[in-house]
Amino acid sequence: MKYFIYKTTNLVNNKTYIGIHQTENIDDGYIGSGLHFLRAVKKYGKDNFKREILEFCSSYDELIEKEKLLVNEEWVKDKTNYNLKTGGQSTGILSDLSKKKISETLKEKYASGKLVPRATAPYIATDEQKNKISQTLKKKYDSGEIISKTKGKEPWNKGKKGVQVSWNKGVSTGPKTDEQKNKISETLKKHYTENEHKSKGKEPWNKGKKGVQVSWNKGLKQPQIECPYCKKMVDAGNGKRWHFENCKLK
């Protein structure tokens, strides 16, 4: 694994971005991942940016320390740079440009009704917003982007006449009374006289074992890998769900 700190320069306006990267291939085409920087890449095109490696490091921890020194508060405040916060994988110190953009975005959302102050009543969508959500969902279902969970399944009350009452109607949450427990028990007994239990014929996983059983993966931790877009260290097993190609900063 190679660890290095780099600087990417916009060949059109000479604005720069400093970041860190770990990779098996230093020619992987990676040039940066900051939100402000990625917007610039989209605007000017990736071909108008040039990355240069400033220094190689022996570990990721060393990279973090180097980034803290180079991407400091003074660097962030310099408007000729794309970095929006100080380095070091922390929350960082936002630049004046970042603070201004966040403020303007929030003002617009509050003015349009997309956001409601917490002190006010719960947010209720307008008829226009409800219609927009409805139309968006219809398009996604029609295009196959979203697949209905009930597609191809028969409704549970097909062929039944009259109003159907759920078995737990009137049962409150929290500790149950003896009457409620008895009602649930009778309902389940009736259900399993007509339907086969899913575990029927299967041996329990702990059959023949004595004492409290410890899960096979207790104490084990998944290896951590870095998302190339947001720079966060995530679990190798499930990190791809919200990062890498699905990262919001891609």
Image: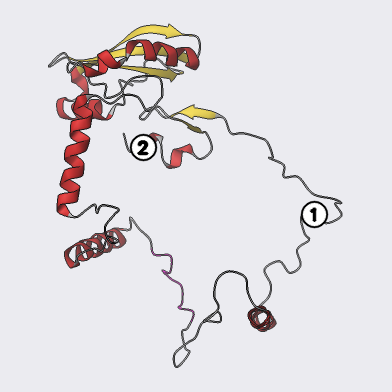
Would you identify the image quadrant in which residue 215 lies?
A: top right
Residue 248 in the magenta stretch? The answer is no
Residue 154 in the magenta stretch? The answer is yes
Q: Position of residue 149 (x, y in %)?
A: 43, 65
Instruction: Give the Cα distance between marks 1 and 2.
Output: 40 Å
Q: Which residue is mark 1?
A: 206
Q: Position of residue 62 (x, y in %)?
A: 47, 12
Would you identify the image quadrant in which residue 228 lies?
A: top left
Tell me the magenta residue range: 148-156
Quick one: which residue is furthest to the top in this view? 55
How many numbered marks are there? 2
Looking at the image, which is closer to me, 19 or 122? 122
Looking at the image, which is closer to me, 218 or 159? 218
Left or right placement of residue 137 versus residue 179 in this view: left
Residue drawn 72% across the image and 42% down it:
216
Which mark is on residue 247? 2
Residue drawn 33% across the image and 55% down it:
145
Residue 21 shows up from this direction:
yes
